[in-house]
Each structure stands twice: as C-alpha cells, then as structure tokens.
C-alpha cells in the first residue's frame, strides 16, 4: 500500500474503533489497555476515535458506527486468537497487529512451541494433557518436579500454577481445566523472567531492550505480580552480558517472524544461571496498561506511549 493510499484510509478524521473489553477472562485488563489507547489517540488528534466494548453483536456495531479502522486492544479468547481478526477480514475493516493465522497460532502454547522448535529456537520440555487424565488414576508425568501447569490458550498467567510435588498436580490441573480443554505441563526452569517486544516503526520491525521482571511478593510472575502496583520490579535493560543480550534479541525477531507476526508482539523468556535461555510464549496484543511491559520497553528505546499507540495504529494500513 502506498503512502497516498494509507493517508486516504488513515487520517485525523478516520472513524477508529478501539475494540476493548470483550468476553475473555482477561476482560478487566483489556478495559484498562483500551481506555489508555483511546486516550492516546484522542491526544494525538484522532477526533473520531471511540471505544467499543466487544460482544456478540460486534459486526452490527461496527457497521452501524461506520468504523473505518479497528484498533484491537483485546486480550485472550475471541480477541487475541484470530476470532475478531476473522470478523474484521470478512467485513473489510483494516485492523491493527497480527492477522488471523498468526493470532490463532500464538494463542495455542503447544502449537507455538512446535513452530519455534522447528525454527531452531530453544523451548522447554512439556506435555499436553486432556481432561480425561482426571479419572481417579495417577497422572503420568514424564517431567521432573517442579512443573508449571498452564491452560493451553490463556494469557496473563490466568489458571497457571507452579507444582512442586506430585500430590499437588491434580488440583492444579483441575484449576487449569476450568479455562481450557487442554493443559500444558512444562518443566519449571529456575532463572530470570524476561520479556522482549517487537514494534513495527516505519514498516520495519524493531526489537526493544530486554526487560527483566522481578516479582516482589510472588515466587514467579503470576497474575497478581503483573497487575498489582509494586508487585514487580522492572529491570530495564535486563542485567545480562552482551552476548546473551544479543542472542535473546536475535531470537526475539526470529520468533516474531517464524510465527508470522506483524506490527507488534511481545515474547517471554526465561534464562537460567548458565545463560541458557528458553522462549515461553508469544503475545500478539501486549498489554497497554500503566503497569504493562511494552510501554516501558518502548520508552527505553525513545518511543513514548502516544507514539507507540500511533505506531500500532499504522499497522492497520501498512
């Protein structure tokens, strides 16, 4: 698309729908992200931007409001998994961020891991279990403890548990199965929790500085640590040697491209005491709250919050 075509679609008078809220377990986080993005768009002069809380009538709402561009600030199911992207494709409404295939892929932790492994990227040993394992018999577990139990298609650490001994596994599985039909059990790796963003600026993907996340009140980076003021200490840039820093940033871009991402993503890592790193997951619609990682990373590379929002907006027409 030429710059002239972009300007015809996207200008200060474009009717932009900021899609937020939604139907997932991450609704509350999305409400905060979306409101922040909407406020930024209005500060930037996009005078016809408006907030739209997504429900089953979203197609009719977009049509009635004559929305020309969708800014997706949804998290989790139906917003980050390709569903809303498919609706927008059918309606011919340009939208921000990753397209249908990459969105659906990265929402599934097991499929993402398979793609990354095929690309030669390091991932942690894991198994995928179905709810039939809760049949009263001992759960077969080829991994050593401790392990992490994760719903296969949830974000924000929702439904996740760290399990230190076999007796606690079934309770963790029951919790995870309330959020998903399949659950990933992953070897727990002791080390630093890291996250790295990718932001498209001027049509080119730019890798952010590495952010180290140190929970102050939790053993690992759980839901409370993510969204409680003071729950996590941000170390930016992360305290890593230069070769490890470069290797992780290179892996970030490769993972972004291997998964077919575009526009923006945030990739989570863990690095152990020997500087061996592993990719945990890819987030295609990173949080944009006051406590979120991506805005802090962008700021560290000289991109303010409003500029970051506009960079993401432009991916709808690039």
Image: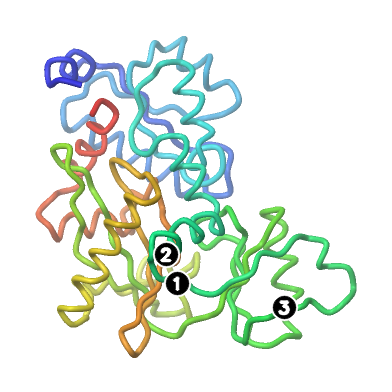
Q: Residue furthest right?
A: 136
User: How many angstroms separate mark 3 from mark 1 (CA)?
Assistant: 19 Å
Cα distance between the residues tagged 1 and 2: 7 Å
Would you say 160 lies left or right of 49 here?
A: right
Question: In this view of the protein, which residue sits in the foreground, 123 or 170?
Answer: 123
Place residue 73 in its image quadrant. Answer: top left
- Left or right placement of residue 70 versus residue 173 in this view: left
Please name the residue that numbered disc 1 is placed on: 221
Q: Which of the two discs, 1 and 2, labels the residue nearer the N terminus? A: 1
For the point 16% across and 26% down, the residue is: 45
> Can you say which quadrant of the picture contains the C terminus?
top left
Secondary structure beneath dot 2 equals helix
Q: Secondary structure at mark 1?
A: loop
**Residue 166, quarter of picture:** bottom right
Q: Position of residue 278 (x, y in %)?
A: 40, 73
Instruction: Give the mark toward the camera: 3 or 1.
Output: 3
- Residue 248 in the image, given as x and y percentages of width and height: 27, 69
> Which residue matches tag 2?
226
Pick the residue in front: 317 or 285.
Answer: 317
Q: Secondary structure at mark 3?
A: helix
Asked whether the beta carbons under mark 1 and mark 2 sit within 8 Å of each other, the answer is yes
Q: Find residue 160 and name its label.
A: none
Image position, residue 136 (x, y; %) = 90, 73
| Residue at 18% in and 20% down | 6
For the residue carrying disc 1, how many other residues have a C-alpha within 10 Å: few (<14), some (14-19), or many (20+)? some
The disc, 3 or 2, on the residue closer to the chain's N-terminal end is 3
**Along the line of sight, which residue is nearer the eye, 39 or 188?**
188
Report how many numbered discs are placed on residues in the image.
3
**The one of 96 and 241 positioned closer to us in this rendering:** 241
| Residue that appears at 18% across and 15% down | 5
Q: Residue 169, located in which quarter of the rendered image?
A: bottom right
**Residue that mark 3 sits on:** 169
């Amino acid at each position: 698309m030429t710059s002239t075509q972009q300007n015809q679609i996207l200008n200060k008078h474009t009717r932009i729908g900021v899609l937020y809220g939604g139907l997932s377990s991450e609704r509350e986080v999305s409400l905060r992200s979306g409101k922040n993005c909407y406020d930024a768009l209005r500060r930037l002069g996009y005078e016809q931007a408006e907030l739209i809380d997504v429900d089953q009538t979203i197609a009719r709402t977009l049509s009635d409001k004559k929305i020309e561009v969708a800014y997706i600030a949804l998290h989790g199911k139906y917003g980050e998994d390709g569903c809303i992207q498919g609706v927008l494709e059918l309606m011919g409404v340009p939208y921000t961020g990753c397209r249908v295939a990459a969105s659906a892929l990265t929402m599934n932790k097991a499929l993402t891991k398979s793609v990354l492994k095929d690309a030669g990227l390091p991932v942690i040993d894991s198994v995928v279990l179905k709810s039939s394992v809760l049949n009263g018999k001992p759960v077969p577990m080829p991994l050593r403890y401790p392990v992490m139990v994760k719903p296969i298609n949830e974000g924000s650490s929702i439904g996740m548990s760290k399990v230190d001994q076999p007796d606690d596994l079934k309770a963790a599985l029951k919790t995870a199965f309330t959020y998903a039909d399949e659950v990933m059990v992953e070897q727990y790796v002791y080390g630093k929790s890291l996250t790295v963003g990718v932001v498209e600026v001027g049509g080119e993907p730019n890798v952010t500085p590495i952010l180290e996340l140190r929970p102050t009140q939790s053993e690992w980076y759980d839901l409370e640590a993510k969204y409680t003021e003071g729950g996590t200490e941000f170390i930016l840039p992360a305290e890593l040697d230069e070769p490890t820093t470069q290797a992780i940033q290179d892996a970030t871009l490769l993972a972004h491209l291997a998964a077919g991402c575009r526009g923006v993503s945030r990739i989570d890592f863990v690095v152990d005491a020997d500087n061996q790193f592993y990719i945990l997951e890819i987030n295609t619609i990173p949080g944009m709250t006051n406590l979120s990682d991506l805005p802090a990373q962008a700021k560290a590379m000289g991109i303010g919050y409003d500029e970051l929002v506009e960079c993401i907006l432009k991916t709808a027409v690039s």
